[in-house]
């Protein structure tokens, strides 16, 4: 259960990071509200997962999922250019996250 919550929390990290960028310094209401709800839920899920998973592993997986999804979303929407090197490095992050799960 902790792993499922951790993965959902990692997805929510990508949501709050994207909403933060779209909030334009908290001047736009909808993205600011999404940011607030997503960051609280993401942190709560991370805290829950850390009750049973090692802190370093849980944090690395959470950050890896959030960072990867944030970049993928930015590339998919065209707000950040895609490149072969970025995709290769993102796959390395995903591979590291999978490796941490398998090593646990």
Image: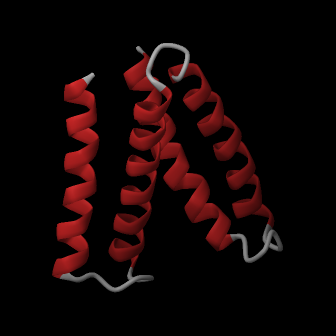
In this view, the residue in front, 10 or 53, is: 53
Q: Quadrant of the C terminus?
A: top left
Compared across the picture, whether 82 is left or right of 25 comes to left
**Residue 42 vs residue 93, the one in the foreground:** 93
Q: Is residue 78 left or right of residue 39?
A: left
Is residue 81 placed above or below 70 in the rendered structure? below
Colour theme:
secondary structure
User: In the displayed structure, would residue 46 be above or below residue 22?
Assistant: above
Quarter of the picture containing the N terminus is top left
Q: Position of residue 90 (x, y in %)?
A: 26, 63
Q: Residue at x 50, y 28 (%)?
A: 55
Query: Percent x, y for residue 14?
Result: 50, 54
Q: Viewed as shown, does residue 87 lie left or right of 3?
A: left
What is the x, y in percent for residue 13?
54, 49
Q: Residue visible at 34% across and 65% down?
A: 72
In the image, residue 87 above or below residue 81: above
On screen, residue 17 versus residue 14, left or right, reads right
Query: Where residue 81 sits: x, y (%)?
Result: 34, 86
How many marks on residues?
A: 0
Q: Which of the 4 image quarters holds residue 45? A: top right
Q: Residue at x 63, y 71 (%)?
A: 21
Tell me which corner region of the image, top left, top right, bottom left or bottom right, holds residue 67: bottom left
Quadrant for residue 23, please give it: bottom right
Residue at 44 percent of width and 20 percent of height = 53
Query: Depth check: 53 or 80 in front?
Result: 53
């Amino acid at each position: 259960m902790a792993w499922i919550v951790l993965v959902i929390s990692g997805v929510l990290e990508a949501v709050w990071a994207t909403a933060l960028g779209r909030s334009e310094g908290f001047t736009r209401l909808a993205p600011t509200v999404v940011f607030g709800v997503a960051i609280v839920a993401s942190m709560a899920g991370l805290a829950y997962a850390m009750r049973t998973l090692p802190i370093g592993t849980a944090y690395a997986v959470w950050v890896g999922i959030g960072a990867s999804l944030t970049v993928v979303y930015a590339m998919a929407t065209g707000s950040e250019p895609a490149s072969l090197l970025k995709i290769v490095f993102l796959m390395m992050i995903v591979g590291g996250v999978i490796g941490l799960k398998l090593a646990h």
